[in-house]
Image (tube, rainbow, N blue to C red):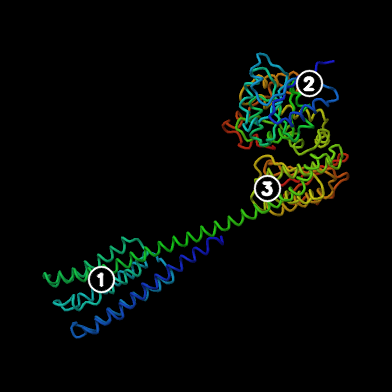
Amino acid sequence: MEQPVTVAIIEDHPVVTEGVASWIRSDPGQRARVVRMAPDLAGLRALPQPSADVVILDLELAGTLVTAQIPELVAAGYRVVAFSGHTDPAIVMETLDNGAHAYVSKEEGRDHLVEAVLAAAADRPYVTRSQARAMLADQQQARPVLSQQERQALLLWFQGMSKASVGRRMSVSENTVRQYISRARAKYAATGRTAASKDALLARAIEDGVLKPGEIIPYQSFARGAGDPPSLGLPGR
Amino acid sequence: MTTVQPAAIMSGRYQRAFTLAVLFLVVGWHLAGAGGQLLHNGPAYGSFAFQAAMWLVMALAIAVGSVLVLLRGIQGRRAAWAVAVVALAASTAAAAASPAAQMLAVNWAWGSAGWTGLLVLMRRRFGELVLFLAAEAMATLGVQAWDGLHRSDLAGFLAVLAWSTGAQVAVAAGVRALDAAAGQAAAAARSEHIARERAATAEIVRAARHARWLALQESAVPLVAELAAGTADPSDEEVRTRCAVQAARLRRLLAEGDEVPGSLVHELYASADVAERRGIAVEIETAGPLPQVPRPARRAITDAAIAILTEARSQARITLAAVAEGIAVSFVADTGDGVLLPASGDEIVIQQQQDGYMFWAEVRWNSQ
């Protein structure tokens, strides 16, 4: 049997820490194990070696947003799953751009947190509905080009359908839906600032056959091209 | 629009009152002042008939000028100057026809011409009035010089210039000051009106929010108290449903930044409120900058929302997403069975799908 994934919970509200720990404990496969709980990042910083595979990071510690600390954690060898009460797409995108593997809002925690942690440990994409929402709402210049199917799958997933229902709607298998969504997420790992975690995610996606290296095209190379129709790459096309 | 009108009307009313005051002054002067002098000095003029004719020409100019300022307010340059030039010409002709030695003593026309010019030029640029009064003074001085200028004549000329033209300039300045004050009063009234309206709107929004908060006090607070006291058991399905409903309401209350009445999100919130009273946990989420949706499409969307929320058993999720050239509003709810939705129509496409217990529908509005 595989070793369980080790998890550090950085969260300043003891009740939430306890809740997260209980979700991890109640996982039927016991696939993850909490090795550390702390109200701030000082303890992790003091350690010479990463002490856990995945850090579940509350983005607001003692009233301060800590999205800017994510690159440091990633550089130290941690995989970060953001767990936050915020659902503002701008914060979600910033968190992902800074190198977090996944974003789980507090409302989504029970259903998605453990799965997101396991996916992160394997460097695989995990896209929650709040993350899909932020990707759909993204208006940044440097956003990646998503195919029509990828956008449609993201939209239906954001709307609240199960992945099986999304598959029925799009006349594809549930597995293909996962591929579409993972591919969209992997494309984001190829844009913005560089981070070891994003490279790992991308490498894994290529290894898994989710994405071909040639499919990674940043948005702006199209939009800025002279003579291109201006509608190219608009949302929903 | 209604906020602008009262101020404009108010300012217009003040201005009209000032115009009437000046009009009475001009007409009064021409009848009593100029007319009196004309009659008093009657025998002194070479031709009384010519002087009387010029007086009538001046009266006609005043009449035309009055109609212009009363009907058109601040009239155009051409009409104003036509009246002014007629007054100037009549006054110069009257002065030229007066006996040389006592021109200033018997002159009735200078004052009238000045007042007439003031009447039509007072709301134009101040420079135009000054130009007219200067031309009027120069014309009279020219006539005087033609007749032979003596030191006593020059002194008389300056005396008349001082009191007549001085008075006219003072009145013009007064009218401008009063106009400005009226404009300020009107602007103040308008901004006060707007501020009052804004305060009233804010108060309505605040009251609605406060009412929801109070309702939460009655529903969420007792639930938390029961949980704390252990009388409500989280493993009980009913308690969990109550928690989900209260949590959804709290989230909505916190997320509500929308203060635009009549928007689609607002209307969907209202539909969700009704469902929540039946114990349905409703989530509403938006993605992307949403376009303004016209009323018929909004109605189709909220009709679908009501139909679906009515059939929901315990939970519903409503999302609004910006899509190319429109908006996709979707509903996912545990209705158990399908829901009868209105047919697609102009600019509106409705799709639905049933997966076991869960029902999905999407209403897409396309602006094209």
Name the mark nearer the viewer: 1 or 2. 2
Q: Chain of mark 2?
A: A
- Do marks 3 and 1 both belong to one polypeptide chain? yes
At label 2, the amino acid type is: Arg
B13 displayed left or right of B112: right
Question: Between marks 3 and 1, how big is the CA–CA gap?
Answer: 68 Å
Q: What x and y, as percent, mark residue A221?
A: 60, 28
Q: Position of residue B353 (x, y in %)?
A: 83, 42
Residue pointed to by mark 3:
B367
Q: Which mark is residue B94?
A: none
Q: Residues within 10 Å of mark 2 (few under 14, many from 20)?
A: some
Locate the N terminus of chain B by quadrant.
bottom right
Give the residue pinned by disc 2. Answer: A33
How many other residues sit within 10 Å of disc 3, few (<14), some (14-19) or many (≥20)? some
Q: Which is more foreground, mark 3 or mark 1?
A: 1
- Judged left or right of residue A117, residue B105 is left
Tell me the element at label 1. helix
User: Is A8 displayed left or right of A26 in the figure?
Assistant: left
Q: CA distance from mark 2 to mark 3?
A: 51 Å
Task: Assess whether mark 2 and mark 1 are in contact (beta carbons under 8 angstroms).
Answer: no
- Say whether residue B176 is left or right of residue A187: left
Can you identify the residue that label 1 sits on?
A: B164
Q: CA distance from mark 1 to mark 2?
A: 102 Å
Question: Residue at the front extreme?
Answer: B229
The answer to which image quadrant residue B123 occupies is bottom left
Q: Is residue A155 above or below residue B90?
A: above
Q: Nearer the viewer, residue A138 or B223?
A: B223
